[in-house]
Amino acid sequence: MAISGNLPKHLEVAARTGVLTSPIRDDFQYRQVAAEIDLSTQRTDLVDLGGMPVPTENPKDVDTLIEKAMIVNPKDWYLTLSISQNAIDDDQTGSLLTKFQNLNPAFQRQLDTKTFELLNAGDGATLGVGYDGQHFFSDAHVDKGASYKTAQDNENALALDATNFNAVMASARQFRDDQSNFTNYAYNLLIGNTVLEPEIFQISSNAQLAGTAERDINPWAGLVRGFTRPELDTTAWMLIASSEVAKPIIVGIRKRPTLSNMWFDSQAGDGGIHYFQYHARYVHVFGDWRLAAQGNT
């Protein structure tokens, strides 16, 4: 990578090592609903095994573990920064270094936003179908080769209140794996659009059920936490089993952010412009639909 000789050495070093020294932040909310996995090839087949069969008294009973597979192809993502030579000459505080110290959070912010945009869409047109060939939120989930026959439903159209929240929670707790075992996931996260914050707070934090004359106890207070996201539709809310190792969204990462190119345009104004281009490769895909139940769109 050729660069102009008038770039201060400390900025060149900062540009080259920015993604190494800038911290990965744990406070982005996408990390509660998306799992990051490293991809080793350009095209990866993600394979998971279904649920364990139920033991029987007959030693001759043989059950087959069901294989669930999905093809993952990472996408290219770029972040290009520009700094004028005049800004470099006039920088007396070293504030230009903060550009490079925020590289990883900049990519994480994009991961964060996209995660909730895709979770909000929950359809094949936006992200492709899930491993079972259905939209992520669907009333027709059936695992191929599953022992159950009746389709399962994680798609609802209910306005957020205590009664409807309880109905969606009860329904989610009835989800079964492909061997017809109850999954027993702990649905402990309620997310919705920012306009639903009062309702989310009432359900997740108020010790008493709102709107009840007898000051009924709220059984979900302290057991379910909540937050809001502007990417969601104004009426949208959903339940997430966020404490499970698996997550509703999978972020397959083929290449972490790295400096790919630096160049200088001497013909630009402000004494010329220095450019720094960073490149990463990753993709979002849907995980197990049982980890999320849509309350409303």
Image (tube, rainbow, N blue to C red):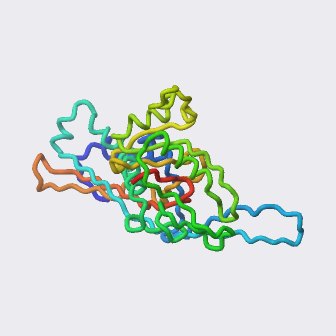
x and y percent of residue 67 in the render? 65, 70
**Which residue appears at 31% of the width and 54% of the height?**
79
x and y percent of residue 27 in the render? 45, 38
Quick one: 158 or 236, which is closer to the camera? 158
x and y percent of residue 89 in the render? 18, 38
Q: Is residue 184 above or below residue 147?
A: above
Where the C terminus falls, by quadrant?
Answer: bottom left
x and y percent of residue 296 in the render? 42, 52
Quarter of the image where one finds residue 221: top right
Q: Is residue 146 above or below residue 93?
A: below
65 left or right, relative to 33: right
Judged from this view, the residue extending furthest toward the front is: 213
Quick one: 26 or 166, which is closer to the camera? 166
Where the N terminus falls, by quadrant?
Answer: bottom left
Residue 123 in sight here: yes
103 left or right, relative to 150: left
**Which residue appears at 82% of the width and 61% of the height?**
55
Residue 254 in sight here: no
268 left or right, relative to 186: left
Quarter of the image where one finds residue 187: top right
Quick one: 176 or 15, which is closer to the camera? 176
Q: How many marks?
A: 0
Quick one: 291 or 17, which is closer to the camera? 291
